[in-house]
Image (cartoon, rainbow, N blue to C red):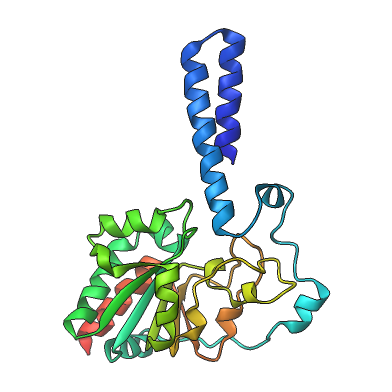
Amino acid sequence: MLNSFTGTAVAMAGFVLNNVVLIIAGALVGASGAILTKLMADAMNRSVMNIMIGGFGGGDTAAGAAAGVGGSVRELGVDDAAIQLAYAQSVIVVPGYGLAVAQAQHAVRELAELLEDRGVDVKYAIHPVAGRMPGHMNVLLAEANVPYPQLREMEDINPEFERADVALVVGANDVTNPAARRPGSPVSGMPILDVDHAKNIIVIKRSMGRGYAGIDNELYTNDKTGMLFADAKEGLANLVSAVKAL
């Protein structure tokens, strides 16, 4: 959205200065920014106006808060996480913005290759708004030479979570929050990855910090979830070493 506004401002400056190059460049940036904003809004099941006036981060309504599920966070050690992954039959990796920030795409690919060598079926669940733009995760994982058939879109991969032994969440937050299914939540109605349906869940995250929506992720207090607190790249590197040692 900010890119769109910037492009529009540049185009307006072009009109004032009678500069055709500025007009064309600004129009292109403004149009592409507007299209990207609309795509992101559609993927979050939100209108552009709703996002502009602050549709996220306002906290639960009374009804939504009452329906929330409390719980404690269970911290998981690297060795325990490595055992779960190494002896699983099916693992679904859920990458998010934290993966991009840490530039951990090569580390997650290395871990996946180790698991595949042990006979584990590895897939990647791609949410359309994971990262900073549509296709962000696809680009990062393609850079790490992840085979394209392993990249599964949300609609295709969601039915498979309930059959997955482990869901490995790396830096993804709001797109995995079960609160989206609950009326009254600020993210109510937003399409999410059904990570909570997996048999076991491992979340690699630096802290319990909130995502863009500004609310707590109920996945983190799920009885099946183990939190591995670490930078995405560091956490994955530690898992690689632990799996190799098994």
**Vertical comparison of 212 with 35: above or below:** below
| Residue furthest out toward the right | 62
Q: Which quarter of the image is occupied by the N terminus? A: top right
- Taking the spot 67% from the left edge, 51% from the top edge, the residue there is 51
Q: Position of residue 10 (x, y in %)?
A: 56, 22
Q: Position of residue 169 (x, y in %)?
A: 43, 74
Which corner quadrant of the image does residue 208 belong to? bottom right
How many numbered dots are placed on residues in this image?
0
Which corner quadrant of the image does residue 59 belong to? bottom right
- Taking the spot 58% from the left edge, 9% from the top edge, the residue there is 17
Q: Is residue 214 left or right of residue 42?
A: right
- Taking the spot 23% from the left edge, 64% from the top edge, the residue there is 147
Q: Position of residue 128 (x, y in %)?
A: 46, 59
Q: Is residue 231 visible?
A: no
- Taking the spot 58% from the left edge, 59% from the top edge, the residue there is 44
Q: Is residue 21 left or right of residue 180?
A: left
**Vertical comparison of 46 with 164: above or below:** above
| Residue furthest out toward the top | 18
Q: Is residue 159 visible?
A: yes
**Vertical comparison of 52 with 44: above or below:** above
Q: Position of residue 131 (x, y in %)?
A: 46, 57
Q: Which quarter of the image is occupied by the C terminus? A: bottom left
